[in-house]
Amino acid sequence: MATANINGVELYYEEHGSGPPILFHHGFTGSHDGWVPIAERLQDRFRCILMDSRGAGDSEHPADGYTIEQYALDVVGMLDHLGLDQVAYVGHSMGGGIGFQLGIEHGERFTHIMLVTPISADGYEPDPVVSARGRQLRVDGDRETLIRERRTGIAREELIDDDEVAEAVDRSLSTSDGHYDDGMVAMATLRVGDRLDEMTTPTLMITAGADALLPANLADFLRLPNASLHVFNRVAHGVQGEVPDEFADVVADFATHGVVNAETLADRLASVQAEAAAV
């Protein structure tokens, strides 16, 4: 557990295990806490690096810098601080939006990119009524209502206990106003969909059958030139929290084997046929 001065801001990070490095980035109002159960499942095989963005978790709350571009530069800065030329990257929700930016602008720094129920590459604009209500609950500090309503967004309620939901809400309430307000604008104004063909790093789109972002995730997946797809059934937006065992297995599999899709299988068949023809 430590902090590093990255681009002039003290950012929190912690590490678990050893092996090929994987950096995990949380969603909009999340923190590194949500990745600890996944790191515990992977630490026997991988070096898991969990970081908090500026304005969230245990990182510093600066006055500015709450843009997708700056969040991405903070990830690159963390890699530089750790002396890592390349890592695998796992980003959830807004962290997935950061993953798009990283893959397009800094793809050489990543061996694999895993996008977990990411915001759309063409921007995420929540229902304005829902958004206004959420902001008012935050301003009011209405923790009990936030806990009660957050639980309704969990597809497998039986697997998430009340303490976990409460901890997530408390982390959400602790984010800086700059991160909450400007980060929401940053997600809404993200526009990199027409550049997804530049994202050549092996990429895994992880989405969920009960998540409202599923259609956007599928559309973005189809625009990625070097990608695999995994869809979890009866799971909502917080995939890693609802099915941590299965999620950790998917991450480990992709970090080990990379992209396997119809195109890679066709290439394999063509190679076998070419070898046979040469005999």
Image (spheres, helix red, strand yellow):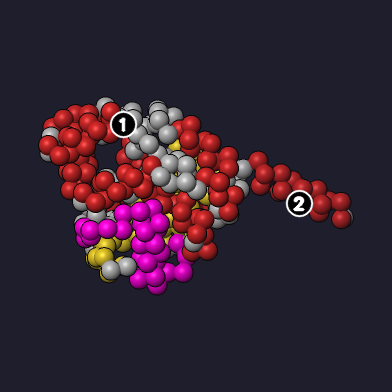
Q: Which mark is residue 39?
A: none
If the image is split into quadrants, where does the N terminus sit? bottom left
**Residue carrying label 1:** 128
The reply to whether the magenta stretch includes residue 62 is yes
Q: Which mark is residue 271?
A: 2
Q: Is residue 221 visible?
A: yes
Type of the residue with mark 1 = Pro
Secondary structure beneath label 1 = helix
User: In the figure, residue 119 lies in which quadrant?
Assistant: top left
**Frontmost residue, 24 versus 247:** 24
Which label sits in the foreground, 2 or 1? 1
Residue 195 at x, y = what percent?
55, 50
Label 1: how many Cα within 10 Å (few below 14, some 14–19, many 20+): few
Type of the residue with mark 2 = Ser
The reply to whether the magenta stretch includes residue 187 is no
Q: Is residue 159 left or right of residue 103?
A: left
**Frontmost residue, 145 versus 84:** 145
Which residue corresponds to the image point at 33% horizontal and 30% vertical from the top-left? 127
Q: What stretch is highlighted in magenta?
A: 59-87
Which residue corresponds to the image point at 67% horizontal and 44% vertical from the top-left? 263
Q: In this view, does 43 lie to the left or right of 231?
A: left
